[in-house]
Amino acid sequence: MDILATAIKIGAFEIQWYGICITLGMAAGICWVVWDLQRQKLNADEFLTMCIIGMPLAILGARLYYVFSHWSSFSQGPWWKIFAIWEGGLAIHGGIFVGLAVIIVYSLVRKMPFFAFADAIVPGVALGQAIGRWGNYFNQELYGSLSELPWAMYIRAENAYYHPAMIYESLWNLLVFGALVWFLSRPHRRGEALAWYFILYSVGRFFIELIRVDRVDVDLGFLTVPASSLVSLACIAGGVALLLFLRRQPKVLVYQAGAPAAKAASKAKAAPKGKAAPKGKADSTVKADSTVKVDSKGKAAPAGKPNQKSKSKKKRKK
């Protein structure tokens, strides 16, 4: 099947599928994060304000990263090609790094908890990537090696069939999105979802990059490695380091609203002293995204309220 890059053409005016997919990806990611923040009764306005600032900077970062990594191609062509993003050429790593920097600075300026903010955003980022990668499909770029598989895609410029590497990455990103949503529904430390995003996305990107034919390689002397694979390894190492750092912090877990553990914590708070809460009825005043401390045996107790065993030990000491 011959794939056309142009979706709409009226005279000289054209709208490319690449731009449509990127826009839909960003819109879907933003809508997911806003919906999730509102579901948790958290402030979505701060996120939208950050998007107004961060989205253009992330796109700029993605484009500059791509231009620098393919400078040999841009240095010989007309200078305005550097800005021709409708022809493709957004390196997601550049967008991720700039976006992360924007979240850090915004959180510091607004005095917001960075990890809580980042954890809420990363599922939307994965969802946006899953949709946006289809723009590369319509542009017939970022494809893999030659293939005779039934799902191989036809590349006009090569007159041959290749692995649809961009679709592999899209499906992987969709799995990462689902994994993060599931993870956030479980008791977790703040910042762990951010760490797992870097690990999971980068694992998939590392292997998919190995089959791409248009990759940029780095010669290490004894080995030639795709540049994006090296960046992915660095991201995996960074994610693992962040997990280890968080695990060394006091064991304080977070329950998202709607999660089974959060409902159990709500019932525990709502119940009168010495009585169990009525089945299926939770205290509606309990805030979403509750922080809960965990005792030495792994049992959760609402933050600021020691469990009964710790109280009895204090009495014995007296």
Image (spheres, rainbow, N blue to C red):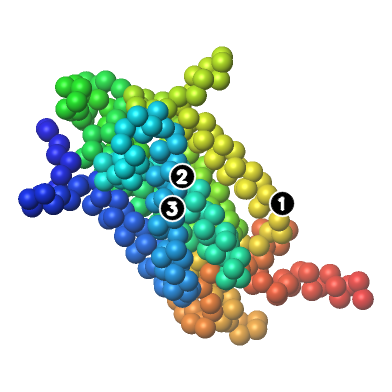
Name the secondary structure under disc 1: loop
Task: Residue type at mark 2: give it.
Answer: Gly
As displayed, is residue 185 above or below residue 214?
Answer: below
Q: Nearer the viewer, mark 1 or mark 2?
A: 2
Nearer to me, 287 or 122 = 122
Is 315 displayed left or right of 258 in the figure?
Answer: right
The residue under the point 25% across, 21% down is: 147
Q: Position of residue 304 (x, y in %)?
A: 70, 74
Amino acid on which the number 3 mark rests in the picture: Ala
Amino acid carrying label 1: it is: Arg
- Give me the disc on residue 58: 3
Provide residue 292's location: percent of width, then percent of height.
Answer: 63, 67
Q: Residue at x 64, y 72 (%)?
A: 302
Outermost residue toward the top in this view: 222
Q: Which residue occupies the foreground of this view, 243 or 305?
A: 243
Which labelled disc corresponds to residue 248? 1
Query: Disc 2 marks which residue?
Result: 94
In this rendering, position of residue 265 left or right of residue 182: right
Instruction: Say which quadrant the N terminus sits in.
Output: top left
User: Residue at 71% of width from left, 51% of height from top?
Assistant: 248
Image location of residue 82, percent across then percent down: 35, 41
Kindly state the secondary structure of the residue where label 2 is placed.
helix
Which circle marks residue 141 in the picture?
Answer: none
Q: Residue at x 27, y 55 (%)?
A: 24
Q: Nearer the viewer, residue 290 or 21?
A: 21
Residue 189, located in which quarter of the rendered image?
bottom right
- Ranked by sequence position, the earlier of labels 3 and 2 is 3
- Secondary structure category for the residue under label 3: helix
Q: Residue furthest right?
A: 318
x, y percent for residue 152: 22, 28
Q: Is residue 175 above or below residue 250?
A: above
Q: Quadrant of the C terminus?
A: bottom right
